[in-house]
Amino acid sequence: MTTNSNELTFLQQQAKIRHRIEEAITQQFAAEDEGLQYALTAARQAGLPQIQISPIQGKLLQLLATACNAHKILEIGSLGGYSGIWLARALPSNGHLITLEINPIHANLVRTAFAKAGVSDRAEVRVGKALDLLPHLESEAPFDLVFLDADKPPYPQYLEWALRLTRPGSFIVADNCVRSGKAFDQPEDEAMAGIVEYNKRIASDERLLSLLLAMDDDYTDGFAISVVKP
Ligand code: SAH
Ligand code: DHB
Ligand code: MG
């Protein structure tokens, strides 16, 4: 009993420390401006699920985009445009972000959010099922960075498309690849099956160098980051 309550206190302190660190890093390195805040508020008011990436994840996407001198970025799964704004802002003025979104209501919110954030000149949302839209992107490839964040069962198929649509030196980043550790267990549903298979492929594919990072707001989920080897 004593041990348990000591342990609980310890874990609560650890969680508090992690939370403080997260907030401090966000404040110092990943502060949101009005454009990003508008996208969040509009999505929340429209009743969209609040499952956008964290500010630190947004900043990491910008860092990766800058590292590979990104001029063309592809995102799969736009929601309210929050991650799209982070990505578009890492592009030069002649750069281009294409984001794919199945839900036309989401897509309309994204267009407004992109306009408010001042990135409409370089960011475009295309409406449809990603697996239907992806074959039409071959003429616009190669993309320097692909960010996967839509439905989870087809993650392995999205990876195949990402490999087809990138170049050596491109980054392929996928959200939700840790899932509280479920990514390392026997999958219990289609979504986890997609993520487990995705991780298995990026870990062993000779064309990629990959790493999983637990880095969401409570370190229980995170990005799978792959670079296409030269
Ligand atoms: N990247 C966003 C969050 C995306 S949430 C952000 O961080 O701000 C996932 C989105 O993928 C939702 O908007 C959902 O409608 C969309 N989606 C789900 N299945 C899809 C599919 N098959 N094709 C395209 N978009 C899909
Ligand atoms: C869910 C999807 C996401 O892309 C995410 O970042 C968090 C949650 C979900 O479908 O539950
Ligand atoms: Mg996600």
Image (cartoon, rainbow, N blue to C red):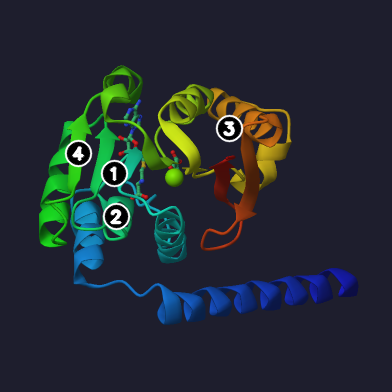
Which disc is residue 79 wearing?
1
Badge 4 element: strand
Question: Mark 1 is on which residue type?
Answer: Leu
Q: Residue at x 49, y 29 (%)?
A: 163
- Residue 63 visible? The answer is yes
Q: Which one is earlier in the sequence, the residue at label 3 or at label 1? A: 1
Query: Mark 1 to mark 2: distance in Å?
Result: 7 Å
Q: Which one is earlier in the sequence, the residue at label 4 or at label 1? A: 1
Query: Mark 3 to mark 2: distance in Å?
Result: 22 Å
Q: Name the residue under label 2.
A: 82
Question: Mark 2 is on which residue type?
Answer: Tyr
- Give x and y (percent) for residue 147: 42, 42
Which disc is residue 195 wearing?
3
Residue at disc 1, CB closer than 8 Å to ligand 1? yes
- Residue 129 visible? The answer is no
In this picture, residue 225 sits left or right of residue 144: right
Q: Quadrant of the C terminus?
A: top right
- The residue carrying pointer 4 sits among few (fewer than 14), some (14 to 19) or many (20 or more) residues within 10 Å by Cα, namely many
Q: Which one is earlier in the sequence, the residue at label 2 or at label 4? A: 2
Q: Residue 93 appears in which quarter of the rendering?
A: bottom left
Q: Which one is earlier in the sequence, the residue at label 3 or at label 2? A: 2
Q: Which residue is drawn at 71% across and 31% down?
A: 204
* Mark toward the viewer: 4 or 1: 4
In this picture, residue 146 sits left or right of residue 182: left
Question: Mark 4 is on which residue type?
Answer: Val
- Give x and y (percent) for residue 105: 16, 37
Which disc is residue 125 wearing?
4
